[in-house]
Image: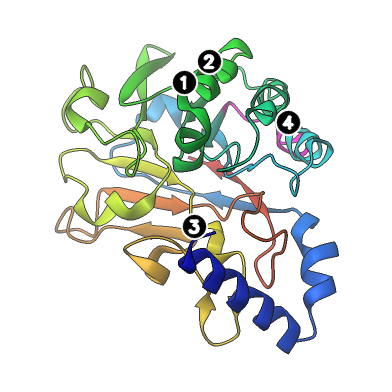
Amino acid sequence: MTRRDFLIRCAAAGVAAATGGGAYAYAVESRWVEVTRRTVAVPGWPAAFDGLRVAHLTDLHHSPIVPLAYLDSCVALVNAERPDVVALTGDYVTRKESRDFIEPMAAAAGKLAAPLGVFATLGNHDMWVDGPAVRGALARHGCAVLGNRSVELARSGARLSVVGIGDLWTEGVNLRAAFRGVPAGRASLVLMHNPDLFERWPAALPGLVLAGHTHGGQVRLPLWGALVTRTDIGRRYDRGLFDWPAATPDGGSTLLYVNAGVGTSLLPVRFLDPPVYAVVDL
């Protein structure tokens, strides 16, 4: 354990103990899955894709502290929403855990159902465990893994690009490769794990960006917010929907949704930050 990890664990444990919420954070909130529903208007969104329903699931972190039965229940909740597209944005397993968690996680993800496809990007933990193995397992179970590349969806003669960005810390971001073939200025659905890239996002690449990584802090303090986000941009984008005002003079052509995710890492607790999946109607 690094000194940083030790201090994070101590801080989280201290918070839970000080509020008398340790048992609640462990036994209740860490499995109390909520849904966030949003209707989002994206500037330049193709009219043929109005009403597209995207289910966003992230940070599954299958490990000894995030059991498979729990992930199966999350998958069932997502399927009940009848999404057109499912977006997965990384950290399916957890650093330092056995590679044996990869295949069961992918089998659970393979139960996700969406007529236009299930699309995924990898996170830093996936790469730390075994990125190629995670990528291959997801692909075998029907998830299209997009690492710095895009695919096109078709509806009523119109096209929508789904773009996957490589993990910022471990794979590297290559926007030129990711957006190759995407018409300039056309709004896209973008999947990436770490939201740190958002404030440097090019104005020429509009659309909706879905991200995870922060866990919403996993432990949140009253009047303070996220305890730890492990991002350079910190609590500014810890969870929720944001736009980038510098993108266009009329208020931004790029939107970011940061999902707090359903899993946990370091400690099997959530406090004032329940696990969540998102349903976005575009």
Pointer 3 residue: 214
Left or right: residue 161 compared with residue 223: left
Q: CA distance from mark 4 to mark 2?
A: 23 Å
Q: Amino acid at mark 4?
A: Asn
Q: Is residue 125 above or below residue 156?
A: below
Pointer 1 residue: 132
User: Label 1: few (<14), some or many (≥20) within 10 Å?
Assistant: few
Report the residue at 67% width, 73% height from top. 272
Mark nearest the camera among 1 and 3 is 1
Q: CA distance from mark 3 to mark 4?
A: 24 Å
User: Label 2: few (<14), some or many (≥20) within 10 Å?
Assistant: some
Residue range (magenta): 77-85
Asked if marks 4 and 2 touch (Cβ < 8 Å), the reply is no
Asked if marks 1 and 2 touch (Cβ < 8 Å), the reply is yes
Whether residue 83 appears in magenta in the rendering, the answer is yes
Q: Is residue 212 above or below residue 214?
A: above
Ranked by sequence position, the earlier of labels 3 and 4 is 4
Q: Which quadrant is the N terminus positioned in? A: bottom right
Asked if marks 3 and 2 touch (Cβ < 8 Å), the reply is no
Choose top left, top right, bottom left or bottom right for residue 138.
top right
Helix, strand or loop for disc 4: helix
Helix, strand or loop for disc 2: helix
